Amino acid sequence: MSKVAQYLQEHVIGEVLTSLDAREYFSTDGSIFKVMPQIIVYPRAENDVRKIARFSWQLAERGRLVPLTARGSGTDQAGSALGQGIMIVFPAHMNKILALDSNKNYVSVQPGINYGKVQQTLLTHGQFLPPFPSSMEYSTIGGAVANNASGEKSVKYGATKDYTKMLRVVLANGEVITTGRLSKKELSQKKGLPTFEGELYRSLDNIFTDNQDLIEKSQINVSKNSAGYNLWDVKGNDGSFDLTPLFVGSQGTLGIITEIVLDTEQYNPQKTLLVANFDDIVKTGQAVEELRKLNPSAIELVDVNLLDFLHDHNPNQLKDVVKEPYPKIILLIEFDDSSAHKQKKGVKKAHKILENYATAVVATKDSNEQEDYWKIRHSAAAVLWQNIGNKKALPVIEDGVVPVERFSEFLQKLYELFDSFNLDVAVWGHAGEGNLHMQPFFDLSQVGDRQKIFKLMDAYYEMVIAFGGTTCGEHNDGRLRAPYLVKLYGQDLYDVFKKIKQICDPYGTLNPGVKLDVTMQDIQPFVRTEYSLAHLYDHMPRT
């Protein structure tokens, strides 16, 4: 065991491992990358995290960089849960609900708690967390906050950032801060502190004041965006200030989150689902634009290519649900209004819209029938766990978002892009937000396929940016999409991101190689020669 590991073992309550098998296990996540950590630590409490951060800071002061990477369940698809230094693994011990108030609609949790466990607990109180990701049953709340995750209900309810009320964060030097909306007077008091927290507030407030115009004009006009740092929700017009939005979606590069307070919503189990078939992409886009105005809780899409794939590889998924010949596109539109009258009214208006564009529409209030229809959308998971020879579906271009009014044009261009690369494509995702997913099949053991991946990525992300979109809506930058941030935002705003990183992490100990200062040349050596989701097979991954 190294001297660093020995020191940690003597000073933290949690366990410290350096064995090869443990390091090997944590060298991969849901991405195409492999990065071997030096040390694994399972913190038992916030104080352990503070000691780890403080020790890393002290080493950095002496010129020795030992990076810190926070990790949940390793579902991240962009490589942000990987690091070459100390891996801080939260689910083992820091996995508890700390408080739940169904009257005030909030829940306080530790970052390592399973998202699905929190959701089930909330449901027993008539509450839920709307921005749940498809990986909810096998991912953590901490991971969702780190990525600013969202999912099928986000078209109505928004992303994780919209529900994160307060955070406790361990800073790079081991200090702990509690974030939340501060008045102008409270901000002034924080700026007067002689601590690292005080320095943080002074410097960050200056950054936001000096770059106000640049920040405002750089906001991308899409339904959701997790690229870069969220600079747009920090400083209010009234002079209030909240660092919570900055840390949400920062992927452990600005601080390590140890407690999360989330707002919740009232849950209504009485929903209505409409399933609409389309034979025309343009008509689908027109329908989506009109349906959005009705505020449905979901507008989800699957295309004919996904249905064909399922028919070939797992036909039972579609049995008695979708009949051949398959439509070009299927939309699932859900209404969950607590008022039965309002829900009925929304469904009636949706029916009228769909009559103008769809070839067939089915509506149901029966929960069992709804579950059968939702299988169509959730069956996209089959792409993840099927092999085609030595080829596996890879998450390399699967999270772009474009303005909803350009959704149908974007989908058509997607098909053309895949044709130009001679690749089959199955598309699914959040049509109501212009956020589509697709995972092409490649064999990472083949040099030609590895080269093709990066050419495809360049073409895809350039196309998304050209459409006025963002490179990631819910899966964040990580290592994978970090090289595209300059193209997305421009050098000036990118430099603001870098200044913020420098202020929060002056020695670069917090998850380096993620989000900023990452090039294609940096990430290519980390690409695996094989791809597997073996560490998630207990849960059957979903997308």
Image: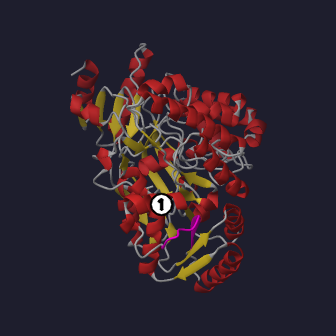
Residue name at image x 58 percent, y 85 percent: 340
Residue name at image x 66 percent, y 83 percent: 348
Percent across and percent down for residue 508 are 49, 24
| Colour scheme of the rendered structure | secondary structure
**In the rendered structure, does residue 390 fall within the stretch colored magenta?**
no
Q: Is residue 366 above or below residue 460?
A: below
- Residue 456 horizontal side relative to residue 467, left or right: left
Q: Amino acid at mark 1?
A: Asp
Q: Is residue 143 above or below residue 98?
A: above
Percent across and percent down for residue 528 are 38, 32
Residue name at image x 44 percent, y 16 percent: 61
**In the rendered structure, does residue 330 fall within the stretch colored magenta?**
yes
User: Would you call the spot at circle 1 few (<14 residues within 10 Å), some (14-19), or many (20 or more)?
Assistant: some
Residue labelled with disc 1 = 308
Q: Note whether residue 25 is visible.
A: yes
Q: Nearer the viewer, residue 60 or 536?
A: 536
Q: Magenta residues, as a range? A: 323-334
Kind of element beneath mark 1:
helix
Residue name at image x 58 percent, y 45 percent: 418
Percent across and percent down for residue 1 are 21, 22
Q: Quadrant of residue 351?
A: bottom right
Percent across and percent down for residue 183 are 65, 48
Q: Nearer the viewer, residue 344 or 542?
A: 542
Give the position of the C terminus as an image quadrant: bottom left
